[in-house]
Each structure stands twice: as structure tokens, then as C-alpha cells.
Amino acid sequence: MDKVGELVQAFLKNKTRSGMLLFLKGILTPGELEELSTRLQIVKLIKAGIPHQEIARRLKVGVATVTRGSRELKLGRFKKI
């Protein structure tokens, strides 16, 4: 199994909110955890129809970061969010 596959398996083993939170805090730095949380918010705001410029302003990220989230959304990678 490749490294990404092993990471996916590790995520899947954490079936509770508390277990997942402990795992995330253990594997990610506080900055990385914040970055992932921001990316999730980007996707949610795009889905809510908020303009890219507004999302960038609200979350204090670049428009390119928002555009990347939009592109991934169009590829169908966030169907369960």
C-alpha cells in the first residue's frame, strides 16, 4: 500500500469525533489543522453561493485558494460536504 493509501486507512480507523480529533492533532501541526479547516469553510461557502472575492475576504485567503476549492468542487470531490 502506498503512503496515501495508508493515510486513508488511518483516517478510516477513527470512527468517533474524539478519536478523529486526537488523530488530527497528533498528525498535523496547529497551522496545518487551521489550514484544513479553512479549506473546508471555503468549500461550504462556495456551495452556499458566496462570491469568490467575498470568501477570500472573509477567510483572509487569496482568491487563488478559493478558485482551487471551486475547481475541486466541480470535479465532484466534495459531494458529502
Image: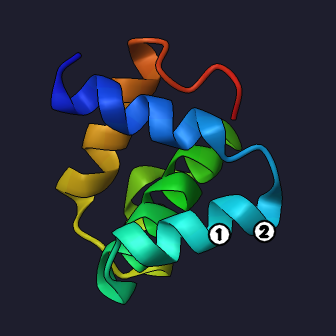
Q: Please give the label number shown on residue 18.
A: 2
Q: Is residue 19 above or below residue 26?
A: above
In this rendering, would 37 be left or right of 3? right
- Residue 19: x percent and y percent? 71, 62
Q: Nearer the viewer, residue 45 or 49?
A: 45
Q: Are marks 2 and 1 in contact (CB under 8 Å)?
A: yes
Q: Nearer the viewer, residue 43 or 37?
A: 37
Q: Residue sitting at 38 percent across and 87 percent down?
A: 30
Q: Please give the label number shown on residue 53.
A: none
- Residue 73: x percent and y percent? 46, 25
In this rendering, would 25 be left or right of 16? left
Q: Residue sitting at 71 percent across and 25 percent down?
A: 80
As drawn, which residue projects farthest toward the bottom?
30
Where is mark 1, residue-wise? 21
Q: Residue sitting at 53 percent across and 41 percent down?
A: 11
Q: Nearer the viewer, residue 80 or 18?
A: 18
* Crowd band around label 2 with a 10 angstrom C-alpha radius: few (<14), some (14–19), many (20+): few
Residue 78, by quadrant, is top right
Q: Please, what secondary structure does the residue beneath circle 2 have?
A: helix
Q: Amino acid at mark 2?
A: Ser
- Residue 10: x percent and y percent? 48, 41
